[in-house]
Image (cartoon, rainbow, N blue to C red):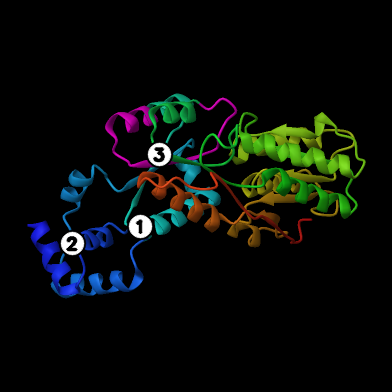
């Protein structure tokens, strides 16, 4: 029945049935004028494709997967992932794909989710986040030949398809700015130590210190989980030093805001006594006091590039280059 309908659409639009099928699947390679003709006829006839039948014929679910290692409550308050998910949903819709999001409280449950996705093939491909040095997910998916794109970095850099910021350069930018404004005891508040992004930004932080002739002090480097309690504990550890740091580069805005609040609770003035710079330039930066200086990492660009690359892999198009970099920039506000 669906094939008869598509044949009718093809006849009325003056195109082949194969073109109709490609338009209905959201193939971006279809000529724009042909697409408009087909969609006009589709609207005129009130034709709605049978998604289940399409999936059976193409062996595709038209679902993209994203698994995030977070407690669901923590994810709800995370502005980076909220923005990233929204942008991926919008971009996937342009190609007639939908996004399936899972959360995993532990590394073990995260691995179980990936195994289930591989076994059932209920998604056509995966977007990965927060890579680690020895990342079992990447090894497993690569061995299975399952389509995935990593938002992050992985070594060797041409081994898998990745979209990322220049995290080393971005952390250098943040640290360099603080040093140029006269700070000399700059601390680094990272995320979990095993994450590639934590290590890359630590590398950029160290490089900026060296460029300014400031000695690296490992006691000024602390790590925290992605929650306010852990960030407050790490900040307290920094502030207990003698002398305490006069600036903090934090891995993301949530950690930076927790660090600012902890510093103020302990009698420090921001930015007079201690300056703070975050990452992601989330909307919260404008609503804290003082407003938070942050590195904008162009989340829409990350989402667009990752989604485009993944859809291409699913549909048999090998991306070139396999690693794409989104720009970052410093947004100056009153916290630094």
Which residue range is magenta in the image?
A: 113-135
Mark 2 or mark 1, earlier in chain: 2
Q: Which residue is mark 1?
A: 95
- Which of label 3 and label 2 is nearer to you? 2
Which image quadrant is residue 118 in? top left
The quadrant of the picture occupied by the N terminus is: bottom left
* Residue in the foreground of this view, choosing between 218 and 117: 117
Q: Which residue is mark 3?
A: 147
Q: How far apart are the two marked residues, 3 and 1, measured between alpha carbons?
A: 16 Å
Q: Is residue 87 above or below residue 196?
A: below
* Residue in the foreground of this view, choosing between 98 and 272: 98
For mark 2, give the secondary structure: helix
Q: Which residue is mark 2?
A: 17
* Residue in the foreground of this view, choosing between 60 and 120: 60
For mark 3, give the secondary structure: loop
The reply, left or right, for residue 153 in relation to residue 6 is: right
* Residue in the foreground of this view, choosing between 316 and 229: 316
The reply, left or right, for residue 305 in relation to residue 3 is: right
């Amino acid at each position: 029945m669906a094939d008869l309908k598509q044949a009718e659409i093809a006849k009325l639009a003056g195109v082949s049935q194969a073109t109709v099928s490609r338009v209905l699947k959201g193939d971006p390679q279809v000529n724009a004028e042909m697409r408009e003709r087909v969609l006009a006829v589709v609207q005129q006839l009130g034709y709605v494709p049978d998604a289940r039948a399409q999936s059976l014929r193409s062996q595709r679910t038209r679902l993209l997967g994203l698994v995030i290692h977070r407690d669901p409550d923590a994810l709800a308050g995370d502005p980076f992932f909220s923005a990233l998910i929204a942008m991926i949903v919008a971009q996937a819709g342009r190609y007639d794909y939908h996004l399936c999001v899972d959360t995993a409280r532990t590394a073990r449950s995260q691995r179980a989710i990936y195994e289930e996705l591989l076994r059932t093939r209920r998604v056509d491909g995966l977007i990965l986040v927060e890579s680690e040095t020895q990342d079992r997910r990447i090894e497993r998916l690569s061995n299975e030949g399952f389509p995935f794109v990593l938002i992050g970095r992985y070594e060797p850099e041409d081994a898998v398809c990745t979209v990322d910021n220049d995290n080393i350069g971005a952390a250098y930018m943040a640290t360099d700015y603080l040093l140029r404004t006269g700070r000399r005891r700059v601390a680094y508040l990272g995320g979990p130590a095993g994450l590639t992004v934590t290590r890359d930004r630590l590398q950029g932080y160290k490089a900026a210190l060296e460029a300014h002739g400031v000695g690296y002090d490992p006691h000024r480097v602390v790590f925290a989980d992605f929650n306010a309690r852990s960030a407050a504990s790490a900040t307290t550890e920094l502030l207990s030093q003698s002398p305490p740091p006069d600036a903090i580069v934090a891995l993301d805005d949530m950690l930076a805001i927790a660090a600012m609040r902890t510093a103020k609770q302990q009698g420090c003035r921001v930015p007079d006594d201690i300056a703070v710079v975050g990452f992601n330039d989330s909307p919260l930066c404008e609503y804290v006091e003082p407003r938070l200086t942050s590195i904008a990492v162009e989340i829409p660009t990350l989402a667009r590039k990752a989604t485009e690359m993944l859809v291409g892999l699913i549909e048999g198009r090998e991306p070139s280059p396999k690693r794409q970099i989104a720009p970052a920039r410093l947004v100056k506000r009153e916290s630094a």
